[in-house]
Image: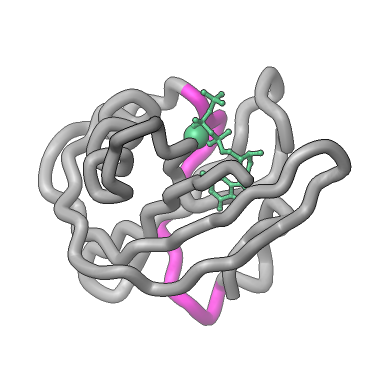
């Protein structure tokens, strides 16, 4: 079981979604940015690290939202989503090819990676 942390980053009423770049697994699917939790790492520390690596932004991790187990063909992941706030930094696309700030009523317009938490 691979633990993955995902950030739902709010700024006001809107939150950030990101589309996985063509060279990544699940390419073209939208996701909440984040990644695999390393050994000995807390989900909070993982998210702060991943958001710096993937988007070059600083976030505050507020609280746990939900979790979902998903079995892919060869691996299973546990996706843990956290409510975060945008703090600072200009977004750079290191792992994604697009980001959008959306509100919750727009989410059905996007196709998410299979372990997406609704
Ligand atoms: N971050 C994130 N990953 C998701 C979501 N939904 C979903 O199925 N996944 C899957 C895709 C990947 O198979 C798996 C691990 O996420 P990841 O590829 O972001 O991991 P990572 O940032 O550590 O990337 P890498 O170093 O392995 O390339 O989780 C989601 O909403 N957010
Ligand atoms: Mg990632």
Of residue 13 and residue 53, the one placed in the foreground of this image is 53
Left or right position of 78 against 93: right
Magenta segment, which residues? 95-106
User: In the rendered view, would you say 89 is above or below 113?
Assistant: above
Q: Residue at x 32, y 69 (%)?
A: 64
Inspect this view and state whether residue 100 appears: no
> Given the current orientation, which residue lies at the most extreme bottom position?
105
Q: Residue at x 77, y 53 (%)?
A: 71
Total residue callouts: 0
User: In the rendered view, would you say 87 is above or below 14?
Assistant: above
Horizontal and vertical percent position of residue 35: 47, 38
Of residue 99 and residue 55, the one placed in the foreground of this image is 55
Residue 82 on the magenta span: no
Tell me, what colour scheme is on the image? one colour
Q: Residue at x 75, y 40 (%)?
A: 75
User: In the rendered view, would you say 96 is above or below 5?
Assistant: above
Horizontal and vertical percent position of residue 10: 28, 64
Q: Residue at x 12, y 48 (%)?
A: 87
Residue 105 on the magenta span: yes
Q: Quadrant of the C terminus?
A: bottom right
Left or right position of 31 against 71: left
Horizontal and vertical percent position of residue 111: 72, 57
């Amino acid at each position: 079981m691979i633990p993955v942390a995902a950030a739902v980053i709010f700024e006001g009423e809107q939150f950030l979604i990101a589309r996985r770049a063509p060279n990544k697994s699940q390419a073209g699917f939208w996701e909440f940015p984040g990644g695999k939790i390393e050994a000995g790492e807390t989900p909070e520390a993982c998210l702060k690290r991943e958001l710096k690596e993937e988007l070059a932004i600083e976030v505050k991790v507020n609280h746990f939202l939900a979790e979902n187990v998903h079995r892919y063909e060869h691996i299973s992941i546990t996706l843990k989503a956290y409510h975060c706030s945008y703090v600072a930094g200009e977004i750079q696309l290191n792992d994604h090819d697009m980001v959008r700030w959306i509100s919750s009523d727009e989410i059905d317009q996007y196709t998410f990676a299979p372990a997406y938490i609704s």
